[in-house]
Image: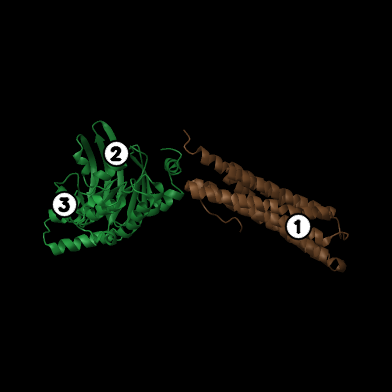
């Protein structure tokens, strides 16, 4: 008989909660970007308001994990599952905070006409979110190789971040009255770059979960 | 298996086998036990852990039909081969059991029993030994006013500490503990665990326990036995975080056993 079916189902629930939280955060990033591009200020506000749902979910994950540690004396991989569940929830919460930051930038820019069509920034977002998806799949399937591969994509995001910020700053001389908008768009690039970094941290946690070894992929 | 780089071993068990009649209870055990460390032995019921600990002071030879092969080296001599003075061996290798088993005598006489057998008669010397032993197990303050009271009047936890004090009174080098807290309440259990951590400054301790958290809390090394085999022996921190063998992981995470 399975002597720990109850505990196993709690571990599964914890994982599902982390993944649910990640799904909400991913969605928040997309919505914030949409609000930015379409200058939909109402939507930007909604993204900011909806963040507390994600925060609440993180508290629930914390409480559940705490109770499991207190009552089940987890060791070895069981313990890593709980620790990693907690850490991933915390990374995901910070990704959601970046979505809030993007939404705030959308509000700062407001209805001011964009200096040019925003094309590359959403592409960069897609790259970061693809990384996030891979990292979460790696978490779900406990696939250390996929986690490693996912983290390798961070370099491309970093490279794009550098390029876009250079490009944006280059617009300032010709558009001195749009300095605020250009600065905000640069910030958005930074926020997306941070999302990719949090994703890399998720990948590191997946590798720790599977192998028990700590590695630094953020180099 | 070499988790030890230095040779300060209290015991060095090599290629050890034990049979109860036809039943092969311990299979090819290689198990070095380092001095002044706590070594915990864990494993499911019937895995051989109690059998193993009872071979270390040859208590096992009281059971009829036991056959052994291999080496159990203690202080450089194989206790299986050489003509040993068993009384002397057990003076050096003390043992306590699951349940405190004081003699139906006074607290004082329980502890003085061993030293008296070994020829100590002077009251002053015996008193010193009794006081020191009771202090070692943190029982002195609780019983100092009633040393002549019957030991069986003590609580279960106190009786167990008394028995540990009794084992210490003959100044052993090694202390074997076979599930010493399984019959005790949680606070008495924690007192014994605290005491173990104090005692390892002076003694080599081998403890068999069903309580895995206890093994994790008190021991330096942990050995996992399964069906008569020593599956894994390593640093306790390693065993409880990243055991090398999946059977160990299955056991410590409560998936089988």
Q: Residue A139, relative to residue B20: is it above or below?
A: below
The chain coloured green is B
Cα distance, mark 2 to mark 3? Answer: 25 Å
Q: Secondary structure at mark 3?
A: helix
Q: Is residue A48 left or right of residue B144?
A: right
Name the residue at 19% across, 61% down. Answer: B129
Residue B211 seen in render: yes
Q: Residue A118, relative to residue B80: is it above or below?
A: below
Image coords of residue B112 (percent x, y):
17, 56
- Which residue is identified by label 1? A102
Disc 3 packing (10 Å; few <14; some 14–19; many ≥20): few
Image coords of residue A199 (percent x, y):
65, 52
Residues at marks 3 and 1 on the same chain: no
- Which residue is identified by label 3? B88
The chain coloured brown is A
Answer with mark 2 or mark 3, whichever residue precedes in sequence: 2
Disc 1 packing (10 Å; few <14; some 14–19; many ≥20): many
The residue lying toward the viewer, choosing from B40 and B211, is B211
Name the residue at 48% across, 46% down. Answer: A72
């Amino acid at each position: 008989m399975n002597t720990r079916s109850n505990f196993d189902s709690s571990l599964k629930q914890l994982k599902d909660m982390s993944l649910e939280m990640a799904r909400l955060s991913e969605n928040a990033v997309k919505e914030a970007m949409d609000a930015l591009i379409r200058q939909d200020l109402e939507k930007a506000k909604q993204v900011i308001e909806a963040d507390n749902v994600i925060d609440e979910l993180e508290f629930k994950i914390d409480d559940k994990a705490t109770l499991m540690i207190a009552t089940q004396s987890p060791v070895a991989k069981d313990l890593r599952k709980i620790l990693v569940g907690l850490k991933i929830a915390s990374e995901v919460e910070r990704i959601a905070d970046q979505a809030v930051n993007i939404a705030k930038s959308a509000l700062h820019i407001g209805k001011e006409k964009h200096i040019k069509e925003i094309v590359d920034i959403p592409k960069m977002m897609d790259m970061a979110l693809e990384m996030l998806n891979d990292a979460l799949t790696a978490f779900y399937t406990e696939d250390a190789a996929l986690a490693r591969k996912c983290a390798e994509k961070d370099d491309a995001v970093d490279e794009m971040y550098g390029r876009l910020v250079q490009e944006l700053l280059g617009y300032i001389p010709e558009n001195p009255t749009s300095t605020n908008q250009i600065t905000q768009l640069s910030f958005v690039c930074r926020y997306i770059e941070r999302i990719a970094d949090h994703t890399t941290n998720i990948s590191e946690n997946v590798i720790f979960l599977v192998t028990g070894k700590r590695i630094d992929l953020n180099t | 298996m070499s988790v030890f780089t230095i040779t300060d071993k209290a015991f060095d068990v090599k290629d050890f086998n034990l049979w109860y009649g036809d039943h092969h209870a311990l299979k090819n055990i290689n198990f070095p036990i380092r001095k002044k460390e706590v070594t915990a032995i864990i494993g499911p019921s019937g895995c051989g852990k109690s059998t193993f600990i009872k071979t270390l002071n040859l208590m096992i030879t009281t059971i009829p039909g036991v056959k052994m092969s291999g080496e159990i080296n203690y202080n450089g001599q194989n206790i299986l081969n050489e003509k040993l003075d068993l009384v002397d061996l057990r003076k050096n290798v003390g043992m306590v059991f699951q349940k405190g088993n004081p003699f139906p005598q006074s607290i004082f006489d329980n502890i003085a029993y061993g030293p008296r057998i070994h020829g100590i008669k002077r009251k002053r010397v015996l008193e010193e030994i009794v006081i020191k032993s009771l202090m070692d197990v943190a029982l002195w303050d609780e019983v100092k006013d009633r040393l002549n009271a019957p030991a069986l009047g003590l609580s279960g936890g106190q009786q167990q500490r008394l028995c540990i004090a009794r084992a210490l009174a003959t100044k052993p080098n090694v202390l074997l503990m076979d599930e010493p807290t399984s019959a005790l309440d949680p606070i008495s259990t924690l007192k014994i665990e605290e005491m173990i951590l104090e005692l390892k400054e002076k003694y080599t301790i081998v403890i068999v326990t069903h309580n895995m958290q206890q093994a994790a809390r008190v021991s330096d090394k942990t050995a996992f036995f399964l069906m008569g085999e020593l599956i894994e022996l390593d640093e306790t921190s390693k065993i409880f975080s990243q055991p090398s063998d999946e059977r160990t992981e299955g056991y410590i995470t409560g998936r089988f056993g």
